[in-house]
Image: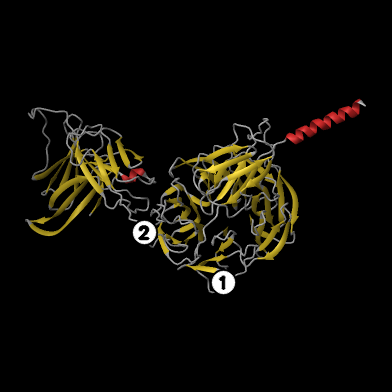
């Protein structure tokens, strides 16, 4: 009897615990939806009324990073209202954390992870007008690999992030959008190296997009995280090495463990495992090996059984393998599909609009579509005409269309991007919409570049430009205000400037982040050559702080010529100014001093610091001996050391300047006068080696 009573009490206790469990009963928008209204909100219903406190959702975008918004509770409903509307075509990731609790203090049983896609407007899908964006110099080949249209500077429009490879640059480049589809010209490298795979994501949850890229090195491949410090300025963060010969083939982004931050799944080209890089929420990752993947050629993850976590699909010579997630990033193999086929490509999406993720593959049986019954059981539906490169709603009708390059066997080759519209049930059998280009594109990306709600096309080929094809009419042109110098300190031709003064240039508008700030502002001394110092960028200006103070009475010139690493100007014209530093004073009476010998018929005498020791040396020239004499200052106004070098006969003049910008004073000598009758003249450039020796003369 006591035993039965114990069992009864235990059962009642278990029932009470089970009845009190807090679970999610419904979500709006539904998981995997592909045409969600762009104004939101996100709404979740729970099995019990919610309590006050930490009832917040974690909402991130693949276009913009973590999204800001307001969380509110109404009984058993939690509502997230985004601060800004969703971007057309962006994928929104939602994590429902276990910090959410009921009014009775009971936490959510398990985290829930799901995603949806924001709706696009009904564009005409007629891509007639083209705009080009120059990434490099004309007639210079440049291979553009992966391209992403994402908001890297948090200004509400889509910028262009791309991997580029050319004879002069291997980098990840970033072109900023002005909101009308006008991109900054020239390559703005935000990471250097031979980049291959590229994934923008908000790794630290601070509301702006960082990115991860794979870089080939002499010792293998390295994954590097580049942290966005605001408005598209980056610093290198976490780095993960990959052994030589292992790839990777693919990088997958998602919240694998339901903790509210984005993790990374690394798919290798060789080996029998994959690596799950678990994010700590601050952009630092802990690797975890997923073994037994055989020779997987590709992977995809998504909530395949609709239980609120990301499951894993792998493909290879073994067929298709499904691994279910326990909610804590432990993946258990449960099924293998079509073991008689070999696959090398896989992606998942809700193709037939029934609320679950379907499967698209490619392999030795061609492109195939498998439909999901909602529980992770897949059935082959039909063969596709081509392998999709992108699945997105190009015509704004609420289903996913296929966008791809023409098949390789097309004869003659078709220089176009092809769009095949979905019939709503996963059929792509209608005629393709071919968007022609002058040459065959290497890669492409879709996105709402001009902010009109429909998706435009951006493609690259082997030239130095990328091409933008507008969906419908091109955006109306808007006046572009040229970048100009507005203020200058010290002022132009100013005298008596304090030797410790910085040089500050103010522009008429905010600057895009320069890749090499020192190249935008150069400062020269007439007596010492190019001056060393530190250049920093403000929102609308540049500041140069010299490494050492200016010298008394020094004539300083400023050259403000903003250039990118490929030499494309940003300012409409070079801006040059000069000023003179103050001296300590004096009476104007001269006494004492020393005498230094020079050659006969010396007609030009100059003072400059040719050996970089901080004092002024003397240079003189003679048109009889055809020599330049360098008299080095000992620091006390005496010149015991003399050096000579010979130039062409008939010297007519001499001047000094840092002509090669290496920080020392060079000598320029003109010649070509005989008996005061002009003959063929020339200027000889004598380069300083930094110690007052002049070699490497150039005529």
Q: Quadrant of residue 180?
A: bottom left
Q: Categorize mark 1 by other alpha carbons within 10 Å: few (<14), some (14-19), many (20+).
A: few
Tell me which residue sits at (59%, 52%) in the image. Answer: 250
129 vs 334, left or right, is left
Circle 2: element type: loop
Q: Residue furthest front?
A: 75
144 vs 301, left or right, is left
Q: Residue furthest right?
A: 1
Position of 591 relative to 222 (above/below): above
Q: x, y percentage for residue 596? A: 12, 35
Q: x, y percentage for residue 430? A: 60, 70
Q: Residue tagged by mark 1?
A: 410
Q: Residue tagged by mark 2?
A: 477
User: How far is disc 2 from disc 1 in space, using C-alphas?
Assistant: 37 Å
Position of 52 relative to 522 (above/below): above
The answer to whether any part of residue 354 appears in the image is: yes
Evaluate if marks 2 and 1 touch, with contact meaning CB atoms under 8 Å apart.
no
Q: x, y percentage for residue 377? A: 74, 54
Identify which residue, 158 or 87, lies in the foreground: 87
Circle 1: element type: loop
Q: Disc 2 vs disc 1: which is toward the camera? A: 2
The answer to whether any part of residue 284 appears in the image is: no
Identify which residue, 233 or 683, lies in the foreground: 233
529 vs 511, left or right, is left
Identify which residue, 127 or 644, lies in the foreground: 127
Q: Residue furthest top?
A: 2
**Disc with the residue nearer the chain's start (2 vs 1):** 1
Label count reads: 2
Q: x, y percentage for residue 44? A: 63, 43
Identify which residue, 289 or 261, lies in the foreground: 261
Quadrant (top left, top right, bottom left, bottom right) of the N terminus: top right
């Amino acid at each position: 009897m006591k035993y039965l009573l114990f069992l009864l009490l235990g059962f009642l206790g278990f029932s009470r615990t089970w009845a009190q469990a807090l679970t999610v009963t419904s979500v709006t928008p539904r998981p995997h939806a592909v045409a969600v209204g762009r104004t939101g909100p996100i709404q979740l219903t729970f099995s019990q009324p919610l309590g006050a406190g930490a009832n917040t959702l974690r909402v991130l975008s693949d276009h913009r990073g973590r999204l800001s918004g307001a969380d509110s509770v109404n009984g058993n409903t939690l509502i997230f209202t985004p601060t800004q509307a969703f971007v057309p075509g962006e994928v929104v990731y939602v994590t429902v954390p276990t910090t959410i609790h009921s009014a009775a203090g009971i936490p959510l049983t398990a985290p829930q992870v799901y995603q949806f896609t924001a709706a696009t407007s009904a564009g005409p899908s007629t891509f007639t007008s083209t705009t080009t964006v120059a990434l490099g110099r004309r007639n210079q080949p440049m291979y553009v690999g992966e391209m992403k249209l994402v908001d890297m500077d948090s200004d509400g429009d889509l910028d262009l992030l791309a991997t580029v490879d050319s004879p002069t640059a291997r980098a990840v480049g970033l072109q900023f959008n002005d909101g009308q589809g006008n991109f900054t010209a020239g390559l703005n490298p935000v990471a250097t190296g031979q980049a291959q795979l590229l994934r923008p994501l908000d790794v630290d949850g601070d509301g702006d997009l960082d990115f991860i890229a794979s870089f080939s090195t002499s010792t293998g491949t390295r994954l590097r995280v580049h942290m966005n410090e605001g408005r598209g300025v980056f610093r290198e963060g976490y780095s993960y090495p990959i052994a030589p010969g292992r790839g990777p083939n693919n990088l997958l982004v998602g919240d694998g463990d339901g903790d509210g931050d984005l993790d990374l799944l690394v798919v290798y080209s060789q080996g029998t495992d994959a690596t799950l890089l678990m994010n700590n929420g601050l952009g630092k990752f802990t690797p975890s090996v997923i073994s037994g993947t055989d020779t997987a050629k590709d992977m995809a993850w998504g909530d395949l059984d609709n239980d609120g976590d990301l499951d894993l699909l792998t493909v290879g010579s073994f067929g298709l393998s499904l691994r279910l997630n326990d909610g804590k990033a432990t993946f258990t193999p449960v099924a293998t599909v079509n073991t008689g086929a070999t696959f090398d490509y896989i992606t998942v999406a809700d193709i037939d609009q029934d609320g679950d993720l379907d499967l698209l593959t490619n392999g030795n049986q061609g492109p195939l579509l498998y439909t999901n019954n909602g529980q992770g059981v897949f059935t082959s539906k039909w063969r596709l005409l081509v392998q999709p490169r992108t699945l997105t709603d190009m015509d704004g009708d609420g289903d996913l269309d296929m966008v791809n390059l023409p098949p390789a066997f097309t004869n003659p080759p078709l220089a176009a991007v092809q769009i095949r519209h979905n019939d709503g049930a996963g059929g792509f059998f209608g005629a393709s919409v071919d968007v022609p280009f002058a040459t065959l594109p290497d890669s492409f990306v879709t996105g709402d570049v001009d902010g009109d709600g429909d998706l435009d096309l951006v493609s690259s080929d082997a030239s130095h430009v990328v091409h933008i094809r507008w969906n419908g009419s091109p955006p109306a042109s808007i006046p572009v205000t040229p970048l100009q110098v507005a203020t200058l300190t010290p002022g132009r031709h100013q005298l008596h400037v304090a030797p410790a003064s910085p040089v500050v240039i103010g522009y008429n508008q905010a600057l895009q982040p320069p890749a090499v700030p020192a190249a935008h502002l150069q400062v020269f001394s007439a007596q010492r050559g190019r001056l060393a110092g530190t250049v920093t960028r403000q929102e609308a200006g540049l500041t140069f702080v010299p490494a050492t103070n200016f010298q008394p009475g020094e004539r300083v010139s400023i050259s403000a010529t903003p250039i990118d690493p490929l030499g494309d100007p940003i300012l409409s014209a070079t801006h040059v100014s000069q000023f003179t530093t103050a001296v300590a004073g004096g009476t104007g009476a001269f006494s004492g001093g020393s005498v230094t010998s020079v050659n006969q018929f010396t007609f030009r005498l100059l003072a400059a610091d040719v050996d970089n020791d901080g004092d002024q040396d003397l240079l003189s020239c003679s048109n009889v001996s055809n020599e330049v004499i360098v008299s080095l200052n000992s620091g006390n106004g005496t010149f015991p050391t003399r050096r000579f070098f010979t130039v062409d006969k008939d010297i007519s003049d001499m001047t000094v300047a840092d002509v090669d910008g290496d920080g020392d004073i060079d000598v320029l000598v003109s010649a070509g006068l005989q008996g005061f009758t002009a003959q063929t003249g020339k200027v000889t450039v004598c380069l300083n080696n930094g110690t007052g020796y002049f070699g490497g003369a150039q005529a």
